[in-house]
Amino acid sequence: VGLLGWAVGPAVGGVLAERGGAVRLPYVVIGSVLIGSAGLYALLPETRRARGSADASPGAARPPPLRTLLADRSQRALLASRFGLIVGWAAWLTVVPLRAASVWGAGAADLGLMFSALTFVGLAAAPVGGLLADRLGSRRVALGSSALGALAVMSRPLCRSRASFWASMAVWD
């Protein structure tokens, strides 16, 4: 449900912002949903152990210190991957809309449709990536897809039409 909201939300929000004449409307809708869901947190069980409980004893397992995690090559790779993911999200939210507006005059509805469509592309591609990882190995697939995504991002300045922009975004996604 969350992924479907992520996939459908930008298109609906873009149309509401553009056709509704009020850019504020999506913010009001989202804020209202967040306020309405805030009370649900009170229903969640507490996961933090009280001091003095058996699990909080001095001999209980504790998370490793940061330097121990950073000494592990796999952990460093995961950290770098996460950094790349966050940088990509930041670009989707800032640079991509500016470039789309300059390349083909994208408005709020155009951007929402593009982001929603590309989220569906990602949802459809995920099982394919999993199958490829099972057959070829996750390292090869991660390396290949990361390189392909990087090339798609670097090609963005060459995009001069809506179609080329969408194709570049789809490859990146």
Image (tube, helix red, strand yellow):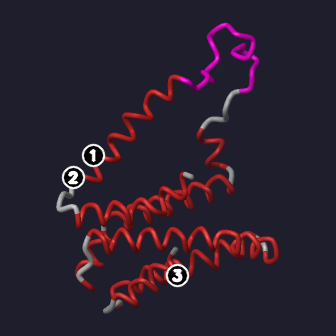
Q: CA distance from mark 1 to mark 2?
A: 6 Å
Left or right placement of residue 143 versus residue 119 in this view: right
Q: Residue 39, position in %: x, y? A: 45, 27
Which residue is labeled 2 in the image? 24
Q: Which mark is residue 171?
A: 3
* Residues marked 1 and 2 touching at CB (< 8 Å): yes
User: Depth-wise, is mark 2 or mark 3 nearer the camera?
Assistant: 2
Q: Is 45 part of what is drawn in magenta?
A: yes
Q: CA distance from mark 3 to mark 1?
A: 33 Å
Disc 2 packing (10 Å; few <14; some 14–19; many ≥20) = few
Disc 3 packing (10 Å; few <14; some 14–19; many ≥20) = some
Q: Residue 147, position in %: x, y? A: 57, 79
Which residue is labeled 1 in the image? 28
Task: Look at the numbered disc 3 and give the secondary structure of its residue.
Answer: helix
Q: CA distance from mark 2 to mark 3?
A: 32 Å
Q: Residue 91, position in %: x, y? A: 37, 67
* The image quarter in which residue 122 lies: bottom right
Task: Name which residue type carries label 2.
Answer: Arg
Answer with mark 2 or mark 3, whichever residue precedes in sequence: 2
- In the image, residue 71 sits, relative to residue 126, either above or below, namely above
Task: Look at the numbered disc 1 and give the secondary structure of its residue.
Answer: helix
Task: Name which residue type carries label 1.
Answer: Val
For the magenta stretch, what is the residue range?
43-61
Disc 1 packing (10 Å; few <14; some 14–19; many ≥20) = few
Residue found 35% across the figure and 87% down from its top: 162
Task: Name which residue type carries label 3.
Answer: Val
- In the image, residue 9 sits, relative to residue 62, either above or below, namely below
Residue at the top extreme, as displayed: 52
Task: Look at the numbered disc 2 and give the secondary structure of its residue.
Answer: helix
User: Depth-wise, is mark 3 or mark 1 nearer the camera?
Assistant: 1
